[in-house]
Amino acid sequence: MLTEWIVTEIDGKIASISARYGHFAEIAAKVAELPPGSVGSVSTHKITTEELLNMAGKVSWEDFRLFGTKFQVNVWKHLFELEPRLYSYSELAALCDNPLGVRSVAHAVARNPVVYLIPCHLIIPKESMDKAREIRATAESTLFKGSDLYLLDSIDVGEYAYGPEVKREFIKIHLKH
């Protein structure tokens, strides 16, 4: 698991959390396009994974300053408001009132600028959701009854900017809370 994350803030609001400074460059380019005087400060600092996880329970939607299209921000807001469980891209598209726009919703999920706090890691391929349901149905008569965490090692969790191992760890952590 990665141990350090780079937080970029604009006027004290979170614009991105990433393991790479490339996000900072993207945010700086967006800020450069804004009218002069509309931004007071831009800063970055590093936090540990533990600090990131602690932020999750304390942050509200108003704590973000996100740069994206209206559609992307809508998808990110829906992600932020999700109940802690796994969702397919199709389910998320339906929640975003765009059931036919699975690919565009998936693209917005992939562009999520805020690691873990906006839980894009909870979105997995539909085929994996189907397999998880099948395994869960079989497991109802076993010792694993009621626990979904054992499923993670047996399904494809999909793409993630920091690799499937980090995504699996984030899912496990998120679903425990």
Image (cartoon, helix red, strand yellow):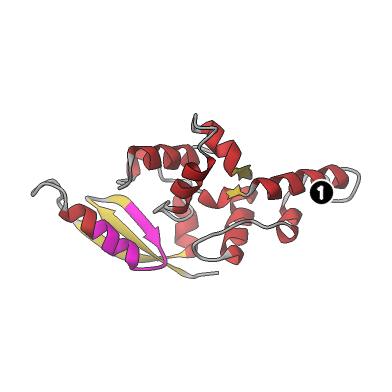
In the rendered structure, the answer to whether residue 170 lies left or right of residue 14 reads right
Q: Position of residue 58 (x, y in %)?
A: 43, 46
Is residue 33 or residue 137 the one in the foreground?
33
Circle 1 crowding by C-alpha within 10 Å: few under 14, some 14–19, many from 20: some
**Residue 54 among those drawn in magenta:** no
- Identify the residue under disc 1: 135
Which residue is located at x 83 percent, y 50 percent?
144
Q: Is mark 1 on a helix, strand or loop?
A: helix
* Residue 95, above or below 15: above
Q: Total of numbered circles in the picture?
A: 1
Q: Position of residue 88 (x, y in %)?
A: 62, 43
**Residue 22 among those drawn in magenta:** yes
Locate residue 9: give its quadrant.
bottom left
Residue that sits furthest to the top in the current view: 97
Which residue is located at x 83 percent, y 45 percent?
145
In the rendered structure, the answer to whether residue 170 lies left or right of residue 46 reads right
In the rendered structure, the answer to whether residue 104 lies left or right of residue 16 reads right
Tell me which segment is drawn in magenta.
Answer: 15-28
Locate residue 16: give its quadrant.
bottom left
